[in-house]
Image (cartoon, rainbow, N blue to C red):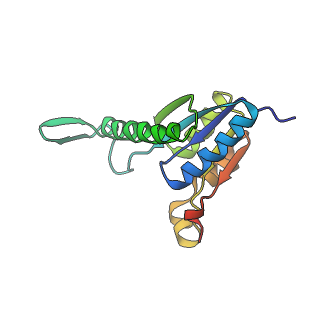
Amino acid sequence: MINLRRILVPVDYSACSRAALEHAAMLAKSFNATIDLLYVWEAPAFIAPEAMVGAAGTTQTLAQLASDQAQAAMREFVTQARADGIEIADTRVEQGDPSHTIVTLAERDGYDLVAMGTHGRSGFAHLLLGSVAEKVVRRSTRPVLTVRSAESQD
């Protein structure tokens, strides 16, 4: 029998992420499981995360700026989810390669399921951008549920 206690939902704050969260919420309710959200940001290859950026007389590292913006977006995402009755146990914002970080955290922290959205890119866009969801499915030893929102379908 399947026993889900903890579900990891990696998000990018898109409609696909929201669809994955909604599916995870249905499963969490059925199994009395908890949902944790994860956002992973990756610094551009040509800019060091330690690079200083500034505006209006303040300076901070690129890493701090990106983390602050990601945290703000996460708070908004969680607020909207909770307004719709979806319970979120914990949230995390991490820096790194998204697929590697998702797989590592899912296995290290003992998640029973990873539920994530997929944009469903194909052709040249898929070749250029790759697919975080595809990489997670290939690398994870945990079950992975991929959800494609109606908005992302061709």
Q: Where's residue 110, x and y in %? A: 68, 28
Q: Where's residue 102, x and y in %? A: 58, 40
In front here: 56 or 148? 148
Q: Is residue 47 above or below residue 142?
A: below
Name the side, left or right, on which 142 lies relative to 12.
right
How many numbered markers are drawn?
Answer: 0
Residue appearing at x 32%, y 47% in the figure: 47
Q: Where's residue 98, x and y in %? A: 53, 45
Q: Where's residue 105, x and y in %? A: 60, 33
In front here: 20 or 101? 20
Q: Residue at the far right: name it.
A: 1
Name the side, left or right, on which 116 lies relative to 95.
right
Residue appearing at x 55%, y 64% in the figure: 151
Q: Is residue 89 above or below residue 41?
A: above
Q: Quadrant of the N terminus?
A: top right
Which quadrant of the view contains residue 79?
top left
**Residue 96 seen in the figure:** no
**Residue 62 seen in the figure:** yes
